[in-house]
Amino acid sequence: MLKPNLNNVNLTMSAGFVSQFPKDQLPQVAFSGRSNVGKSSLINRVLGRKSLARVSSAPGKTITVNFYNVDKQFYLVDLPGYGYARHSAEEQKKWSSLVDGYLAGEHQPDLVVQLIDMKTGPTTDDNMMLSFLNETGIPYFVVATKSDKLNVTDFNKMKDALRTHPLISEQADIIPFSSLKPVAADDIRKKIFTLLDR
Ligand SMILES: Nc1nc2c(ncn2[C@@H]2O[C@H](COP(=O)(O)OP(=O)(O)OP(=O)(O)O)[C@@H](O)[C@H]2O)c(=O)[nH]1
Ligand SMILES: [Mg+2]
């Protein structure tokens, strides 16, 4: 398991263009999910920082790929969220050129943390992303976010629905998470450090 010093984390690049992606060979773990699913909140919890990654009140505001250098051992990559309906055509274009440029680019992620809103369940875009991950064979696991919004019955129902979801590989763990009660942050952090160390 990697043991990075989490006091040594910095935002290396907030890339609005593919040409700005870092060119070194450090491993990369990307956080993917729809706009507003809680990517930045999770990243802050995983890194044990209050507000390193900006948590948005207005979803999908910034269209950049943010590369956090974690103790010179790996990059944690905050992808811009997909599926925000109010994006203009121009913003959509920018989004897909950036995200496609990243996912199909020279340095594909070594690991993807796929976030799915536990209240909403998987969207069409989530399913597309899961299909892509299955096809490319990029290792991934799922974090089911905003678990605090469900009562016990619905929580268990959605947990089962995700576990039997045809596009979520049996090998992929599914970890419920709430940024309000982030007890699972430790597990998620350890999982990332372990999976990256292979
Ligand atoms: N109730 C609840 N709200 C959450 C949770 N995680 C995030 N939120 C809220 O959801 C909103 C979006 O959170 P972000 O972390 O900014 O989501 P994001 O996926 O980074 O969004 P974009 O960067 O816009 O794509 C914010 O208002 C958060 O406070 C959670 O676990 N529970
Ligand atoms: Mg964000």
Image (cartoon, rainbow, N blue to C red):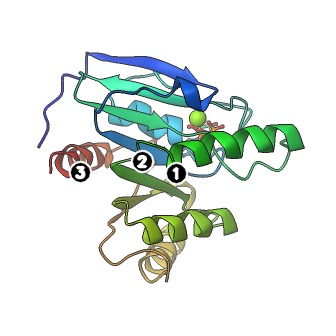
Residue 104 is labelled as 1
Residue type beneath disc 2: Gln
Q: Circle 3 — which element?
A: helix
Q: Residues within 10 Å of mark 2 (few under 14, many from 20)?
A: some
**Residue 59 location in percent, x, y?**
71, 38
Residue 131 seen in the current view:
yes
- Tell how many labels: 3
Work out whether 14 lies above or below 145.
above
Residue 170: which quarter of the image? bottom left
Q: Residues within 10 Å of mark 1 (few under 14, many from 20)?
A: few
Image quadrant for the N terminus? top left
Circles 3, 1 touching at the beta carbon (< 8 Å): no
Residue 88 seen in the current view:
no
- Kindly identify the residue that appears in the image at 37 percent across and 60 percent down: 138
The residue that mark 3 highlights is: 191
- Kindly identify the residue that appears in the image at 44 percent across and 42 percent down: 106
Q: Circle 2 — which element?
A: loop
Q: Between marks 3 and 2, how big is the CA–CA gap?
A: 19 Å
Tell me which label, 3 or 2, sits earlier in the chain: 2
Circles 1, 2 touching at the beta carbon (< 8 Å): yes
**Residue 17 location in percent, x, y?**
63, 28
Tell me which label, 3 or 1, sits earlier in the chain: 1
Q: Circle 1 — which element?
A: loop
- Kindly identify the residue that appears in the image at 69 percent across and 46 percent down: 96
The residue that mark 2 highlights is: 108
Residue type beneath disc 1: Ala
Residue type beneath disc 3: Lys
Q: Between marks 3 and 1, how big is the CA–CA gap?
A: 24 Å
